Amino acid sequence: MKVEFLPSTVGTVATKQFCISTVVNDTIAIDAGSLGMLWPIERQIQIEQIFLSHSHLDHIASLPLFLDNVYRLRPDCPSVYACEETLQCLREDVFNDRLWPDFVQLSEQESPFLELRTIQPEVPVKLRGLTVTPVPLNHIVPTMGFILQDANSSVAVVSDTGPTQRIWEVLADTKNLRAVILDCSFPNSHRWLADKSGHLCPELFVEEIRRLPDSMPVIAYHLKPCFFAEIEHELKAIRRANLEIGVTGREYVF
Ligand SMILES: [Zn+2]
Ligand SMILES: [Zn+2]
């Protein structure tokens, strides 16, 4: 399984993400923060399914642009998978003709821009070569983590979240788990903000990863760029093998 955290900067490609998008096997996106900025355009055309973890802007910001970009350039439309609350936000707050044309209604009348598909907790979505299982996390809006599984490997994307429970139970029974990609948005100095906004800081992060086997690779993700150096310093102080900070643009193979 091939996983890439997309960059979200213009000019020099930075290792930090302002907006969140992850591409799996070139054809599936988890979130669409910067997906619609991806170049060359052929890479966007390849994306067939998009799974949205939740409705926050850093995860959906470029979705309208992406859909606009690939319309007419491909024979079919992309499918957008999300929980009902996130889909409701897209219908009411994004594709409402004010923020962006109503692609949902247009898709019912003309050649479709997108297909909305509702995901349910712990109900796997089987795609060509990959199964995606959503598991609810603990954030300030309904949010799903995702367990990605192919014939050989499983990888979990656990963001955005504060301290959570259910996904660790599900992962304990997940075969071939190769890595966990986990939210670490704030430094310990801003634990109050992590608490209020449903995120993790290194002190909370370390409690969460205790639920995993000691040797399990963990990739810290969703580090806020303005706190990056502080979070990095605190994560490096955690004594654990196989803990790293996700690097944008690098291709991870699991
Ligand atoms: Zn969020
Ligand atoms: Zn976020």
Image (tube, rainbow, N blue to C red):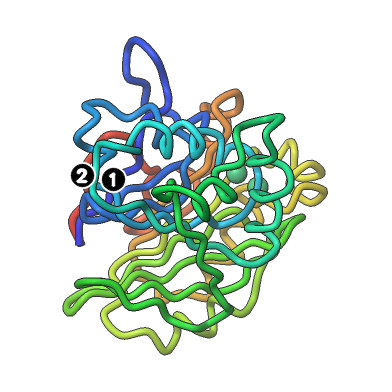
Disc 2 to disc 1: CB gap under 8 Å: yes
Give the structural element (helix, strand or loop) at label 1.
strand
Q: How crowded is mark 2: few (under 14 residues within 10 Å), some or many (20 or more)?
A: some
Q: Residue at x 35, y 38 (%)?
A: 71
**Which residue shows up at 17% across the image and 77% down it?**
152
Q: Which of 148 and 222 is in front in this view?
A: 148
SS under mark 2:
strand
Whether residue 232 is visible to the viewer of this picture, yes or no, is no
Image x and y of residue 153, in percent: 23, 73
Whether residue 112 is visible to the viewer of this picture, yes or no, is yes
Query: Residue 58 vs residue 170: left or right?
Result: right
Label 1 is placed on what type of residue?
Glu
What amino acid is found at the position of numbered circle 2 in the picture?
Glu
- Which disc number belongs to residue 107? none
Which quarter shows the C terminus?
bottom left
| Figure check: 220 above or below 70 | below
Q: Position of residue 210 (x, y in %)?
A: 53, 71
Query: Which residue of the protein is positioned furthest toward the top in this rendering?
Result: 11
Between 55 and 75, the one nearer to me in the picture: 75
Q: Distance between the residues labelled 2 and 1?
A: 5 Å
- Please give the name of the residue rendered at 54% of the width and 45% of the height, measured from the top-left corner: 106
Which residue is located at x 61 percent, y 54 percent?
54
Quadrant of the drawing holding the N terminus: bottom left
In the picture, residue 7 is in which quadrant?
top left
The image's mark for residue 251 is 2
Which residue is labeled 1 in the image? 4
38 to 63, vertically: above or below: above
